[in-house]
Amino acid sequence: MRALILAIQEDPRFPTPYRYLAARYAYSLRRNLLAPVARRRPEHSGARIRQKNAIALSISPSLVRRIAVGPLTEENSMSELQIIGAPQSNYVWAVRIACHEKGVPYTLVPVMPHTAEVDAIHPLGKIPALQHGNVVLAESRAICFYIDHAFSGPPLVSRDAVEGALTEQWISIVNTHFDALVARPYVGAYFFPGTSDGSPNRPVIESALPKLEAQFAMLDRAVAKTGYLVGGAFTLADMNVLPMLFYLHHLPESGAMLGRVANLASYYERHIARPTVKEALPPPFPGRSSWTIEGD
């Protein structure tokens, strides 16, 4: 029985709710007791969520109850977990994927950086932020660490020392080089160009293209062997980079580049179709009907 539960818990082919419940049952076996179940309280009604301009999310319609999981305090186990930030942010999206992978119910509070909700938590007013009872956190990596360690379920980062370190390595490389120095300026030149007529900022785009090609080649080599950034499983390193690849896939030059690097293109197409990724897919920016921007 334990082997079957473990297989369901760790096999991504099973829908998230099944893996979540398997993880819950495995936890109760280890502790020799059933974890407390807390149904939604009146103050967590739809009216309160709408008042806060939040989007209530759940793993599936069948999981309409809050479940206290993992080594949480009584106060936190009875509180809703809030992910605070605009869903279009790649880091907000990565945190939401982590919640779905872990089977953690949450409420999205879709606000922009430097709003009151964000400024109250992040010292620099950036997103995402998290609030869960008396726990408040800023920065996606800190938030994902909390989700991974405070809740039962498949680990987002391997507990093996080497694979865990490699996951941290790729998160760091992607965040400090691929995103900050290349992808973010390039994507911003289309969606937030800063030009007088709102047209794409061509000088920024052209300067990013050679660096973007080199970064794609690096990632192509990284996923060539196993189809994952680390080992043979979907980890936080993959959750972190996929939203960035999604935006690049929908822009003209970067979309064409991605199609030319076979390993990375296959990696992207396979993992962007993963249910936990699709469940957290953000809508286009306000005023846009699609993420795709056609070339000249």
Image (cartoon, grey):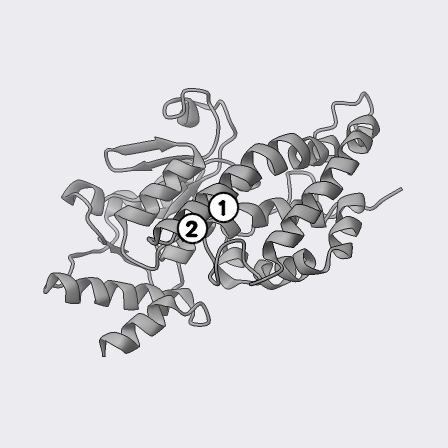
Crowding at dot 1, Cα within 10 Å, few <14 / some 14-19 / many 20+, comes out as: many
Q: Position of residue 261 (x, y in %)?
A: 73, 55
Say if residue 83 shows up in the picture: yes
Helix, strand or loop status at disc 1: helix
Give, as a three-letter code, the residue at label 1.
Answer: Ala
Q: Position of residue 11 (x, y in %)?
A: 41, 70
Mark 2, residue position: 98
Q: Are marks 1 and 2 in contact (CB under 8 Å)?
A: yes
Helix, strand or loop status at disc 2: helix
User: In 3D space, how far apart are the residues under numbered discs 1 and 2 (Cα atoms)?
Assistant: 6 Å
Give, as a three-letter code, the residue at label 2.
Answer: Ala
Which residue is at 39% across, 64% downward?
A: 61
Q: Position of residue 194 (x, y in %)?
A: 74, 23
Crowding at dot 2, Cα within 10 Å, few <14 / some 14-19 / many 20+, comes out as: many
In the rendered image, the quadrant that contains the N terminus is: bottom left
In the rendered image, the quadrant that contains the C terminus is: top right
In-front residue for pair 24/183? 183
Which residue is at 22% across, 52% downward?
A: 70
- Outermost residue on the front side: it is 162
Residue 84 as seen in the image, left or right of residue 244: left
Which residue is at 21% across, 42% downward?
A: 76
Q: Which mark identifies residue 94?
A: 1
Q: Position of residue 87 (x, y in %)?
A: 53, 42
What is the total number of numbered labels drawn onto the structure image? 2
Say if residue 289 shows up in the picture: no
Q: Which mark identifies residue 41?
A: none
Which residue is at 44% across, 43% downward?
A: 168
